Amino acid sequence: MSRTSKGSFVVALLAAVFAAAPTAFACGSGYTYAGLASSSMAHGVGARLTTIGAPSVPVTDGHVAGWVGVGGPGEGPGGADEWIQVGLSGFAGSPDSSLYYEVTRAGSAPKYFEVERNLAPGTTRRVAVLEVAGQPNTWRVWVDGRAVSDPIYLPGSDGAWRGIATAESWTGDGSAPCNRFGYRFDDVRIAQQPGGSWQMLADALPIQTGANRLLRAAPASFEAVSADSPTPAPSSKPVYIAGAMQRSLTSSRTKTRVAAHKPQ
């Protein structure tokens, strides 16, 4: 990944933030986000994703992640939860990250698939989800140019969802210190048709909740970092806010972790 002097300065600045003493603020329970959503519907979304510093999750009932994906709670047939995403996650007890993807089929609980583990701070992966050409509503997960999932059928998804690239933080303990994280998203692209026809993200809608920081370096590149301050009015029902777009999410999202999944 190429880095300009400006980019190096930003990385150094964010690394200094993470080196500071952990915050004593309690952030409250719930989800917060910082990222971008495409202004139009997409058949795929991808980005070069890098961890900035080591994630810090003070309690086991919590996580952080940076991911790209489509769909969401209430986005499936009949208002069912349905989505697919891929990214880097962090949990309590480790400064390292895992490469994962997550799938929620309508009527089923989310499933979390771990592709790689013990990834050091600064790790970069090119991640994407893409609808399969000639197979409407069927998706695959891609990492560094290779498929890491089998085809995944998500009914009603063909041309129905925005592409999203975002950081996510969640804790179930309202008295715990804030999670800390940093993710850089470069070269965010949107697929205009199944199988590809990629274009750089433009006219994106911002997603920003809580006290997280969304640092826009370019139209298709940004950093999403936590703030060492309490988040205002967190909720167990997370909210995406993307410009005029606002939708409430369910509080039932749980991750079923499936270790070291390797597609057949």
Image (cartoon, rainbow, N blue to C red):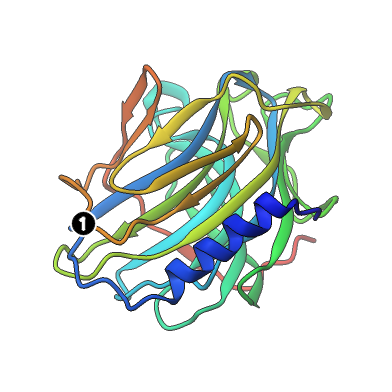
Residue 178, picture quadrant: bottom left
Q: Which image quarter holds the N terminus?
A: bottom right
- 195 left or right of 63? right
Residue 70 figure quarter:
top right
- Amino acid type at circle 1 is Pro
Inspect this view and state whether residue 55 appears: no
Q: Quadrant of residue 161?
A: top right
Query: Which residue lies at the image location 55% right of the left edge and 56% below the top edge?
Result: 183
Task: Say if 173 sits above or below 227 in the image.
Answer: below
Q: Which element carries disc 1, helix, strand or loop? A: loop
Q: Nearer the viewer, residue 4 or 26?
A: 4
Near mark 1 (Cα within 10 A), the count class, few <14, some 14-19 or many ≥20, is: some
Q: Is residue 127 visible?
A: yes
User: Could you tell me which residue is drawn at 43 percent across and 51 percent down?
Assistant: 168
Residue 91 placed where, x, y %?
A: 44, 72
The residue that label 1 is drawn on is 230
Q: Position of residue 165 (x, y in %)?
A: 56, 40
Query: Quick check: 104 left or right of 249?
Result: right
Residue depicted at x 44% and y 27%: 75
Q: How many numbered discs?
A: 1
Percent x, y of residue 203: 59, 19
Left/right placement of residue 229 relative to residue 82 reads: left
